[in-house]
Amino acid sequence: MTACRLSRGGRIDRNKRLRFQFDGRPYEGFGGDTLASALIANGVHLVARSFKYHRPRGIVAAGADEPNALVTVVRDRARCTPNLLATQVELHDGLVAESQNRWPSLALDLSAVNGFVAPLIPAGFYYKTFMWPRAAWSRLYEPRIRAMAGLGRAPTLPDPDRYTRRYAHCDVLIVGGGPAGLAAALAAAEGGAQVLLCDEQAELGGTLLAAGDATIDGKAAQSWLSETVAALSRRDNVTLLPRTTAFGYFPHNMLALAERVTGHLADPAPNLPRERLWQVRAKEVVIAAGAIERPLTFPGNDRPGIMLADAARIYAARYAARPGSRAVVVTVHDGAYRAALELAACGVEIAAVADAREHPDGPLQAAALAAGLPIRTATTVTGTRGRQRVSAVELSQLTSGQSGGGSETVACDLVLMSAGMTPSVQLFSQSRGRLRWDDTLQAYVPGGSAERERSAGACRGIPGLQAALSDGYAQGEAAAAAAGCRTGAVRAFAVSAIEPAPGGMSGAAAVGRRARQPAFVDFQNDVTARDLALAVREGFRSVEHVKRYTTTGMATDQGKTSNMNALGVLSQVTGASIPEIGLTTSRNPYTPVTFGTLAGLARRDLFDPVRCTPMHGWAEEQGAVFEDAGSWKRAHYFPRTGEAMHDAVKRECEAVRRSVGLFDASTLGKIEVIGRGAATFLDRIYVNSFSGLAPGRLRYGVMLRESGFVMDDGVVARLGADRFHVTTTTGGVSRVLHMMEDYLQTEWPDLEVWLTSTTEQWAVIAVQGLNARKVIEPLVSGIDLSPAAMPHMSVREGRICGVPTRLFRVSFTGELGYEINVPADYGRAVWEAVYAAGSASGIVPYGTEAMHVLRAEKGYIIVGQDTDGTATPDDVGLGWTIGKTKTDFIGRRSLALPAMTAPSRKQLVGLLTVNSDIVLEEGAQLVADPRQPVPMSSVGHVTSSYWSPALQRSIALGMVKAGRRRVGETLHVPMPNKTIAVNVVPSQLYDPAGVRLNG
Amino acid sequence: MVEILAKRQGPLDHLAGARGAAVELSVAPPRAKFALRCRADAVAATGRAFGIVLPHEACRATVMEDGAALWLGPDEWLLFAAEGDADATAGQLATALGGTHHSLVDVSHRSCGFTVHGELAATVINHGCPLDLSHASFAVGMCTRTVFDKAEIILWRVDKHTYHVEIERSYAPYVWNMLVEAREEFA
């Protein structure tokens, strides 16, 4: 038994002893402990150093509101999680935790020197101090500040754990498993609703887990709790999710929940996810998030051993952990009396109850008086003592609201503070619900819902167990009814419990002007009441500005314990009421969420789809190197043993020019356009004319945006009067299909046209080179391949290897060529047959790099490489594609604008370096006069640049201002260490007459 | 009929059927598939020629022996037929639809199908598909175009614990592997 463990009581499992380490020291705890409760049971209160001043800090709260006790939990080098709340870390055997933000140790932290200069680093210190000299920011200030800043350290190894993400739907989602949430679940479940209930704690029950002597329907509260949870879990229509935090509320009742699946297990099964993200679409939501206690803002309120009164009570009641031996209670709220009474019953000596109110009066005070607790009314605390644990408090009598009466110093090792309860409205606020200020409660409560949502119990300011149960049941019933389930059930709960009345205060406790110690408002970001007052004096009025200037409420706890007190201080300083000051916005996540949870399965190979063509396996077996084209993998080149990329590409290009090559063009986008209006439709989509295209023929088509700039291109085959096979660029197909559907549905619904995506129906095998016909002829049946019967730019349907094919005679290389379309599952077999048939001709598979070189030699553009979204057809030498007799097509009107035909526009030209060995860099700028001062004025840029095996020299394409008129001129490419002279030439560099195409 | 010399190879052929777990995945055999678009006046004739009444209720599938017709839109159906019958079926449909305005495209190779079977099939599918797959919202016989994470799928509830996933071929390994990973914890 550890020093501070009570000998009986609590929900811990005393048969389950758990060993754990904190900062290298071994301790023992029990099953059911949190790290915080186990540390308290071992008498450990100093657990952290504060963020800015490195002050010693202890455990303040017992749940998600804990501002101080941030720890790193280490399983191994890859599994170490910083910034976990010790109050939320469930103990398991072998748990290893470390404190943060200290060096060399928690007890001796050298950065605590910040504390001595605290008066010199007030709010906005960084903004004021590090502004000059300007250059020092990036060299000196920022690196030093960064080294000091940040909490915890992220692991440097990849996260080895699994995470999953799943969608779920329910009639009623209940957030919070305390009395209100459980009652809501009972009502909704009895009404037949599909119910999902989540709670961030390991056990359902909320405040019932530390309910003391309360009874419900004649049973001890904890018995009622276990019976209720058992009854709910037996129901088919109820899913209970403990350890699950609802952290985000998104539009249309989509809520994100983070479930911690294995974090509490010593040795989790490897197939279980560490955490699971639930994306829940709920018809109705009941928020039963409860309330948290506000700290009292008094001088020296941050020493270890100073805790929220109710948290201290929970440690004793739920965990049988005694948080101290001699306590002073400082309060403005009845709740602290309950804590004092229960702790006194556990053997904690109550040295004093200092209540700042003059006449506190209620059943709890009466009980405290009866128990003989030393109550001092109209008494406040003006300071505390103790370095690593509180050792005494200074109490002072208040006269007319200020301290000044008699004061005394009371020795203690525990201070219980309470300024009242704050309803947890974070999730409600995230749902864009409207908050209302309640003067009696001294708190914001839900005022009006924006979603199909209702709050129940303490989170909407309804105090007490009896009321929480009744309200929870009523809200659950109403939610089920709203979700369309059976309704009308009413249930009353008979509760006996002594409960605190609402009330309390926000802001700084009245202490007079002589208090020397800082009174912390935001423990995690080290913001004091004085900082807030200074911000107001410096002219900040909006709460949003004060927040950003002082950083109050901006720590990882998002100000759960500090926001209301900050508003209270602002109210005290400015004289404006709290509702006049407003409230900062709650954002998701409610508590921090790991990246793994958000990523789910989308990691490594499953991060994004990897799309492969039917012939991918063959290319892999041949040792192809692949490149990414969108989500596709395309064979970039096929290196033979010992070949570098340059050699392989050269060999591939030469094979195509000399004999024949084989290329996988399956990724090209394909759309089947069918209907009586198909030709008319394509006439309007493309700049070209398609109504005049004969069946069996192909045409190269160019498509513009409405702005008149080239959007996509591709070859269109007319298969029949009202059937076209349209091809697009690999990356452009979804954009093109989307635009086509958009026009069809919104602009031209009168056209009888239907579009079907067929990209994946067809494998496309390009066979290019003067021997192409010879290679495929023996495999083809039902098609006359002779040049007369099947000229360049024609399409025939027949069979290849017995498989149906749409055979295109088309070329993107400038050579005689075919593109064999076959049903995709046959792609690999036909590819292999063509490859085998070509072996006598020395057929070579070529990749996308060789394809790029071959097309560049011919001056064929690639949309998106040679165009950049500002090129007209004429700019890239495609003016000839525009149907001269056409009255309309998308982009035609824009092309008529004067700027679109200005002679100074950039035009596509060929660029040949004077030194033929130099390959230009794509993207390099061109200037007319290289001797002009920097910055030079550019006349164009290089869009494509390669070594051309056919021309035995470097080649390039570029967009140059008035480029076609500059043919014959010499331009210059200024590079960092040299200037390269280039001659401007026409863009078709190889076989400009096109003799080889028609072979 | 010309002899087919080339061998079919589907995108999931190299993946073993993922059986023996709480949720089983199995690749569906190849079928003839057609994307049909037509207006109301052609629906009845198409059904007669195809041998299956085309469902007119949204997101419903009708089944007959080897064939099925899946409603995907007010003027859009996906038709399944036995693999060998593709040409014959296409011919029959073309004849039946002769005078009416329609679009019939053979998409037999565009996608592949597989089934997800088991009591937790819906749970596993919900790891990437945001639809409510409860009986009330997605009864047996319902089908729809939807998404599985970053891929588009057609999902069809064949029976209480069996779903057919139809997926464009290049996305098939991605969705399959996601499902294999998702069912891991239910092994």
Image: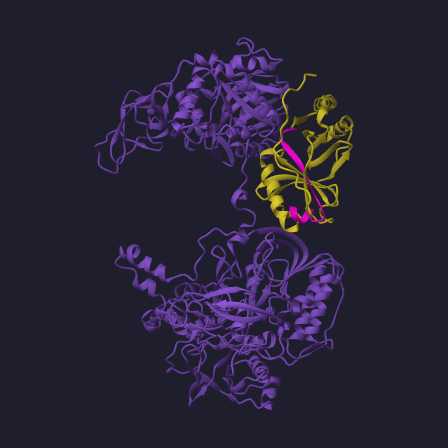
Q: Which residue sits furthest top?
A: A788
Q: Which region shows up in magenta?
A: B107-125
Left or right of B71 on screen, residue A113: left
Residue B141: image quadrant is top right
The one nearer the camera, B26 or A196, is B26
The one nearer the camera, A150 or B4, is B4
Q: Is residue A462 magenta?
A: no
Q: Residue at x 51, y 72 (%)?
A: A39
Vertical comparison of A476 with B161: above or below: below
Left or right of A676 on screen, residue A535: left
Relative image position of residue A498 (x, y in whole percent): 64, 81
Residue B1: image quadrant is top right
The one nearer the camera, A134 or A662, is A662
Q: Residue at x 49, y 72 (%)?
A: A59
Relative image position of residue B173 (x, y in whole percent): 59, 38
Q: Is residue B110 magenta?
A: yes
Hue used for the chain lettered A: purple
Q: Is the N terminus of chain A in the top left, top right, bottom left or bottom right quadrant? A: bottom right
Relative image position of residue A387 (x, y in whole percent): 40, 78
Vertical comparison of A688 with B139: above or below: above
Q: Which chain is yellow?
A: B
Color scheme of the displayed model:
by chain
Number of numbered callouts drawn: 0
Relative image position of residue A783 (x, y in whole percent): 60, 13
For residue A396, say whether it is visible: no
Left or right of A871 on screen, residue A483: right
Vertical comparison of A709 with A449: above or below: above
For residue A359, say whether it is visible: yes
